[in-house]
Image (cartoon, coloured by chain):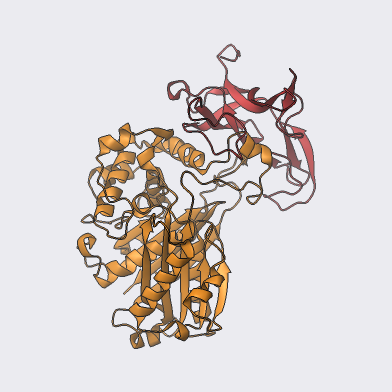
Chain colours: A orange, B red
Amino acid sequence: MSNDVAIVGIGMHKFGRTEGVSGMEQGAVAVREACKDAGVDWSDIEFAFGGSAAAGAPDTMVSQLGLTGVQFINVANGCATGGSALFSAVNTIKAGVAELGIAIGFDKHERGAFRVNTKGAGLSDWYGASGMALTTQFFGMKINRYMEEYGISHESLARVSAKAFRNGAKNPMAWRRKELSEAQVLEAAMLSYPLTQYMFCSPGEGGVAMILAPADKAHKYTDKPVFLKSAVVRSRKFGSFEVMAPHIALEHNAGPTVDASKAAFEMAGMGPDDIDIAQLQDTESGAEIMHMAENGFCEHGEQERMLAMGETEIDGRLPINTDGGCLANGEPVGASGLRQVYENVLQLRGEAGARQVPNDPKTAYTHVYGAPGISGVTILSR
Amino acid sequence: MARVPVADGVFTSVDDPRLIGSKCDNCGNHMFPTQGSCPKCAGTSTSDVELETRGELWTWTVQGYPPKAPPYLGDADPKTFQPFGVGYVELPGQVKVEARLTEADPEKLKIGMPMELTLVPLYTNDDGDEVVTFAFAPISENGEQS
């Protein structure tokens, strides 16, 4: 236990659209809430790792929080930014550098699909000019081939979305809180075949922060510590099929999610059967389906039956995306990964209110995926 | 009105287009567009190669809404925008290339169908020239573009 790390405080600013409040201010709200939750002052925090893709340099938020001289490091890793902040914070504590640290993620994106900076992504101007610099296309193409290979139906895509909005309706911090039927999801505008408007998450706003301490000090701050059994980030290997790729190799590699998942389970000394609840990257509903298998929770193709049987519902065998996921919460890139961990901490504490899973969860799993082919996984236990 | 390529060095010419890729001098891995180092073996010497013009559709989607402009240079006006296909075409023995497709009807696109390189117009530039980019078109069993 001596080298374990605990989450001792969590804070969040509501996801969605908050007019007149900057992304950084939303991050500051989350930090203050996390401090309150842990019963500490901002001045007690010894180090911070913060991430934001579009709402400013995170370290400048000290001018709002208080100029305490804190060691503040910015991280940027696309959709895995939150996971990367957490990874960095965990290992700082494990290294014995400091006792009390915070991981922060926040963002605020313009409306509509992400405008991709092709130069920043290492791509030539002609790629965007020709109409191929759209992340939505990748998701459409990956699930389209997957459906053909493994017999996944359009109805399953709709089931995932309907579940997300049902769960979101129970979550006061979620953006989309209106339930939608499978038929409404299927009949919506086709954005990128086979994915309709309600099968995609939207870029949004929000902030999350969490305070970490060595496990053996956790009870100084909380009577419900949640322990980080693993926090892993992996980038792609040769042959994987990733977002924003003008070419892919003929040979096949399963991708960074499979690698990150295996490493996380190994580090935690657990397997997929030991997990009680999971938050999986659902940039679109097909992604949740593919990530169920890539993270080891089922065989490829088995999702069709699992979804039809309701096994991933809040009261199912393995509840997935209990807070509504990216589909109901939107995706503020810097905050998204930490939102998943926040949800798992609430669930493990038994404080998730109307969406509390009934299986008395003791272990919880998170997974994020993003450009240009990066995955982050955490495993928590109480 | 002349036809001009969207960028130099992506394909050989507007009259007889071939995509220009790279082949690793060490391990033979193919890449597109050209690059000077190899993601497979980390070799730092590559040579330009003209890629195959025919291959099989590996996967596809249809871009159903106008892309943000910039970076898109084609028609992004919601009133006139026409959905277009996008896919990966597997070029035998080389690499899978991402490209626009001339077909945008989900009923007419099938994984594994034969495809051939062509060019499609993007926009008319200030000189009145038609700017074109590369695309793949389905071909019938007798080898004709449909």
Is A103 situated left or right of A274 in this image?
right
Q: Relative to the observer, which residue lies in front, B23 or B82?
A: B82
Q: Residue furthest front?
A: A20
* Picture residue at 52% right of the left edge, 43% below the top: A135
| Residue A132 on image: x %, y % | 58, 37
In the rendered view, would you say B68 is above or below B78?
A: below
* Picture residue at 68% right of the left edge, 42% below the top: A124
Q: Quadrant of the N terminus of chain B?
A: top right
Is A201 situated left or right of A239 in this image?
left
| Residue A116 on image: x %, y % | 57, 46
Q: Quadrant of the C terminus of chain B?
A: top right
In the rendered view, would you say A4 is above or below A265?
A: below
* Picture residue at 41% right of the left edge, 66% below the top: A208
Kindly indicate the quadrant of the structure image that contains residue A217.
Answer: bottom left
In the rendered view, would you say A2 is above or below B51?
A: below
Q: Please tell me how many numbered marks the rendered image carries.
A: 0
